Image (cartoon, rainbow, N blue to C red):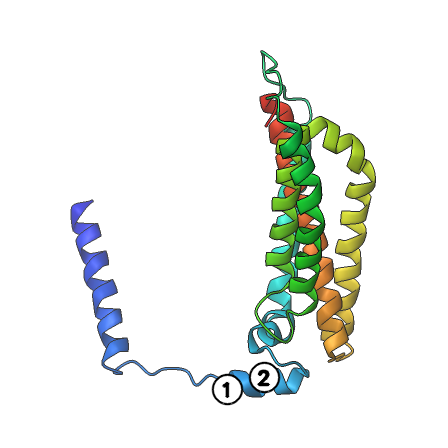
Amino acid sequence: MRWALTFGLLGLTGLLGLGIFEIWPRPCFPDPDEIALAWGVENSVAAIVLGQRLWDTILEVLVYVLAMVGVRFFLAGLRWQTKLPPVAETPFFRRSADLLFGPILVFAIYVAASGHIGPGGGFPAGVIVGSGLLLLALAKGTEQLAAELYEPKLEGLEYAAVLATLVLGALVLIFGLRSATAFVAGNILIALEVAIGAWAVLHRFAAARGEV
């Protein structure tokens, strides 16, 4: 085992050395600014993620959704043996959470909608919304928040967003749709999927544990 580890480290060091001293031929990558210009956006990262490598992004979204389905399925009937009472929060914290969620949601929409012209995109925007839902869950309790959100509709909305993402991906990859509008729509759909998936994980684990 030690000999195998030693040879592996030596081989890795050799490959790094070939790359550092430019002995190993390096591939020629296109200019990111040219890629952004070809896709009609200003952010080269968005042009690569939602354009040049859209297949990878779609597969990442499908893997994420599959993980959410697994969480819903395997944790649906799992409950903690001794149910823990929810931690009592002060009225100030509950009111603060209600007031803060609005600006958090607006900022997330801005991050998603402006991802084609600057830093942002659907994935960070979805995480921001998920963090806002976590704040509300801490203030109100997961079960009360789940009743207010009406989770069955959220689940249907998530699957509808996945279907819309696939349709949008087909328009881009097959029919050659290249516009800033397609990037905005893609980022918003991805943000919706990530946010709902984050809430599903939070709710299922909190329900299995007892409470946040």
Q: Secondary structure at mark 1?
A: loop
Amino acid at circle 1: Asp
Q: Which mark is residue 35?
A: 2
- Picture disc at residue 124: none
Mark 1 to mark 2 CA distance (whole Å)? 7 Å
Q: Is residue 27 above or below residue 91?
A: below
Residue at the image position 76 percent from the left and 79 percent from the top: 177
Residue behind mark 1: 31
Q: Compare residues 164 and 33 and report the one nearer the observer.
A: 33
Q: Residue at x 22, y 73 (%)?
A: 17
At horizontal 63% and vertical 67% (from top left) the residue drawn is: 55
> Residue 24 appears in which quarter of the rendering?
bottom left
What's the residue at 76%, 48% (across, down)? 158
Q: Amino acid at mark 2?
A: Ile
Dividing the picture into quarters, in which one does residue 175 lie? bottom right
Q: Quadrant of residue 210?
A: top right
